[in-house]
Amino acid sequence: MDLYINTQTIIIAVVAILVIFLFVKLFKKIVRVILILIVLAALAFYILIYSNIFTGPDNHKKYSIEYLKDKFCTEMPTQKDSVKCLLIVTPIYEDLKKTYTEEELLKLEKNPIEYFKALNQSIKKNKKDIMKNLAKNKQEQLWENFIQDLSKNYPEQELAE
């Protein structure tokens, strides 16, 4: 068995090795680029789904104090609803209106975390007076109902009690 190697065979072998080497390098770069694109796509998906950066102003309505007043004071079919509006929601609403300027309230609407901080502060600040007024009217259970209603509307947030 004679092994006959000529220059043409050597050149073909060297070219084949170079092509394989270049293909492996190119393949590594392609895989790296694909992995980077997957990570960027996942990050963009996370931002799009879980943040409010791309949402319009209408999506923030539920984080406004006007929404709070509308929710609890617009439809009041029972006397308890009227008491809840008058003795619980109105003091909190008025406190928020006094504490923040219109511009600050608009900023709060766009930042749910800050909105809930402000709402919690107002709830804590007014709780004693609210409870006192509810006790005078023998309606203390309305406080728990109010907190439960808020918790249902904003399940992702922990409200002050």
Image: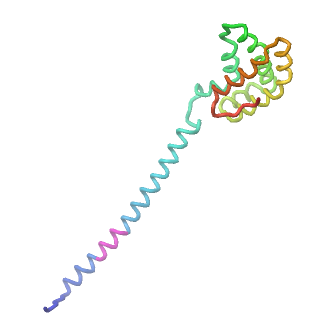
Q: Residue furthest left?
A: 1
- Residue range (magenta): 17-24
Q: Residue furthest bottom?
A: 2
On the image, the x and y values in percent for residue 70 come to: 67, 16
Left or right: 43 in relation to 96: left
Q: Which residue is located at x 36 percent, y 64 percent?
A: 27
Q: Main secondary structure of the magenta part?
A: helix
On the image, the x and y values in percent for residue 103 come to: 73, 28
**Residue 99, quarter of picture:** top right
Work out whether 64 lies above or below 50. above
On the image, the x and y values in percent for residue 89 come to: 75, 18
Q: Which residue is located at x 71 percent, y 21 percent?
A: 146
**Residue 61, quarter of picture:** top right
Residue 33 magenta-drawn? no
Left or right: 92 in relation to 150: right
**Which one is nearer the viewer's eye here, 95 or 23?**
95
On the image, the x and y values in percent for residue 36 come to: 47, 56
Q: Which residue is located at x 71 percent, y 25 percent?
A: 147
The type of colouring in the image is rainbow
**Which one is nearer the viewer's eye here, 136 or 42?**
136
Work out whether 15 lies above or below 120. below
Number of numbered discs visible in the structure rendering: 0
Work out whether 159 lies above or below 28. above
Q: Which residue is located at x 57 percent, y 29 percent?
A: 56
Image quadrant where one finds the C terminus: top right
